[in-house]
Image (tube, rainbow, N blue to C red):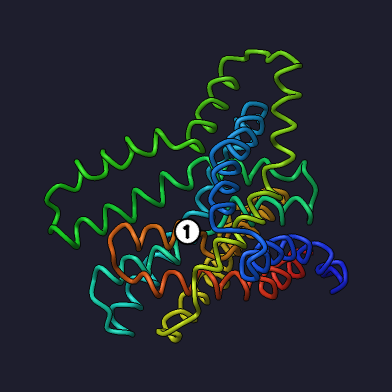
Amino acid sequence: MGLPLSALLDVTLPVFLVLGFGYLAVRLGLFSDAGVEGLMKFSQGFAIPCLLFRAISTLDLGQTFQWPLLLSFYSGATAGFLAGLLGARFLFGRPWQDAVAIGFCGLFSNSLLLGLPITERAYGADALDANYAIIAVHSPYCYALGITVMEVVRHSGRGVLSTVGAVFSGMLRNPLIIGIAAGFAVNLSGAALPSVLTEALDLMVRAALPAALFGLGGVLVRYRPEGDLLTVFFVCGISLVIHPAITWGLGQAMDLGQAPFRSAVVTAAMAPGVNAYLFANMYGVAKRVAATTVLVATALSVLTVSAWLAALG
């Protein structure tokens, strides 16, 4: 039996209200763009890497990294990429490079800034292990797929390996990836961290998601809902409906346990992250579609995420 509407709103609205506070604060001039940059640098460069490090360093890797979990989520993500790519090309007549960037919007869910807090509020902090397993391979997989296809389209396969190698080299300097890698290193080594260090890290962790959500709201002010709205709503449908539906079907077919099944579906149901725009901006294609999709899908997900949570019970 599904959750009542009041319970669903109790789960989702606080997350989106914090995001909305950030949006309004910047929109009304109460918080500067420079402040947003600083807040996002703190949250994504320091606090969230601490969160990922602490979470992964204590995971039971054998229980958490289940192939049915990853296959169900990433099959849905890959299907979303292909649907966005082929739909943009053959339904909306976009150039191939635009189509790849639009496909990336259907691929890259906001697993970190929205997926984590919503799953935690819905099912508790103990339900997040599967979220962390998904997040650990999210950026490497999505960027490897998107960049490889884009380079094939741009150069007919010339220079793909060197380009992907350069991107992975850059990703290894990314604070989020460093936090994940350090967490795996501690976990696999069995090292015990001093309590004074873990308490300091936990202080950073408590600031991570609220700061990131507020900052994300400020970032969304930069994106205006303009033009290409048929394409935008098409991609929103892929991201908010098709991806979680495929994940749901595969998760049930592979008899995924209740906790990882919920985490996979909820994460799949998230709107595209800001990385969808960053990917389009990196190549200078379909930037307006990507930016508008991030904004519109985030707003629509207030309703769609509640529907998925109701279905999950």
Residue bearing mark 1? 108
Q: Is residue 61 left or right of residue 239?
A: right
Instruction: Give the mark count.
Output: 1
Please give the name of the residue rendered at 41% of the width and 85% of the height, measured from the top-left corner: 227
Please give the name of the residue rendered at 39% of the width and 33% of the height, measured from the top-left corner: 172
- Residue 25 position in % (x across, y down): 67, 64
- Residue 35 position in % (x across, y down): 59, 52
Q: Quadrant of the C terminus?
A: bottom right
- Residue 287 position in % (x across, y down): 36, 69
Location of residue 234 with respect to 197 vertically, above or below: below
Location of residue 163 with respect to 79 vertically, above or below: above
* Closest to the observer, 196 or 166: 196
* Closest to the observer, 80 or 154: 154
- Residue 138 position in % (x across, y down): 48, 47
Q: Quadrant of residue 231?
A: bottom left
The kind of secondary structure element at disc 1 is loop
* Closest to the observer, 254 or 88: 88
Location of residue 223 with respect to 215 vertically, above or below: below
Please give the name of the residue rendered at 28% of the width and 60% of the height, measured from the top-left corner: 283
Q: Is residue 207 left or right of residue 96?
A: right
Q: Is residue 74 left or right of residue 103?
A: right
Q: Quadrant of residue 133?
A: top right
